[in-house]
Image (spheres, rainbow, N blue to C red):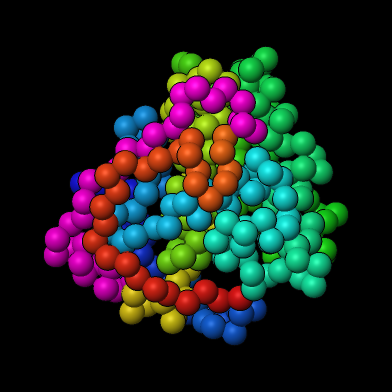
Amino acid sequence: MNNWDKQYIELCERILRDGERVQNRTGIDTIKVFGHTLRFNLAEEFPILTSKFVAWKSAILEMMWIYQVQSNDVNWLTERGVKIWNEWAGEDGTIGTAYGWIVKRFGLTQRLINTLKTNPQDRRMVMSLWQDEYLATANLPSCVWNSQWNVTNGKLNLIVTQRSCDVALGLPFNVTQYAILAMLIAQVTGHEIGEMLWVINDAHLYVNQLDGINAQIEKYKQDGCPPPPKLWINPEIKNFFAFDNSRALSDIKLENYEYNMKINMPVAV
């Protein structure tokens, strides 16, 4: 059984059972709960949902856009067939001073990698995408806004903090993205991979997503789900910025990915 799917279904059930229906900036109500944590042993299981299909290549390319390319240019994604940021692109084709722009502005990726190589017991290994000075000019302030990194017993671990969590669409992408980011960083800094702890402030489902979520839960309860696939990372790559970020993603492959169903659900902008 896929441990990530188990945690995910439990979160969805918690929201449906205990959540409060509220209005929000999008005009589409959500059902929300406060405070939820998830835990993953990345050495034992690669976390990607198998109770439904996750567009894993799009998820990886978005992560590379933020932390490797360090860009806010939506055209980079659309050239690779990823359209998830199109609704937030401004007239200049960017998302303003958010995500990859912040990473580049403060050199976050380079600093983390250098610290992990030279002083892995440093307790200040934090990448924060939440910078007050630049929020007003960000088309969408970062939802997953903070990651804290730690090396214990030679294993690279991280805590990820998410202020606002679209559980149906965003969370499956985000968990897979940061797991892969951690595994890539571990490889290029010479560490084994450890655990990922995920902390959510506002976990919610939009009301126009409930049919899809209920179908996913019903199928999972009836049949379970396939085991998680294996992630292959090209062992020859020792420079984070050298991993292939073309549409082919030739240095990262998902082996034997099976899933219960594909679910199309709307995104609230």
Q: Quadrant of residue 87?
A: bottom right
Q: Is residue 54 magenta?
A: no
Residues 123 and 262: in front is 262
Residues 98 and 164: in front is 98
| Vertical relation: 88 (above or below) 163 | below
Q: Horizontal placement of 259 versus 249: left or right? A: left
| Vertical relation: 209 (above or below) 83 | below
Farthest left residue in view = 222
Q: Position of residue 121 (x, y in %)?
A: 61, 18
The quadrant of the picture occupied by the C terminus is bottom right
Q: Quadrant of residue 137?
A: bottom right
Farthest bottom residue in view = 27
Residue drawn at x 69%, y 22% as measured from the top left: 114
Residues 245 and 30: in front is 245
Residue drawn at x 77%, y 43% as measured from the top left: 104
Residue drawn at x 53%, y 18% as measured from the top left: 190
Q: Horizontal placement of 155 versus 84: left or right? A: left
Q: Is residue 219 magenta?
A: yes
Q: Which residues are magenta?
A: 213-242
Q: Position of residue 118 (x, y in %)?
A: 67, 15
Q: Position of residue 194 (x, y in %)?
A: 43, 28
Q: Horizontal placement of 168 versus 158: left or right? A: left
Q: Is residue 188 visible?
A: yes
How many discs mark residues in the rendered view?
0
Q: Position of residue 135 (x, y in %)?
A: 79, 60
Residue drawn at x 50%, y 43% as measured from the top left: 249
Q: Is residue 14 visible?
A: no
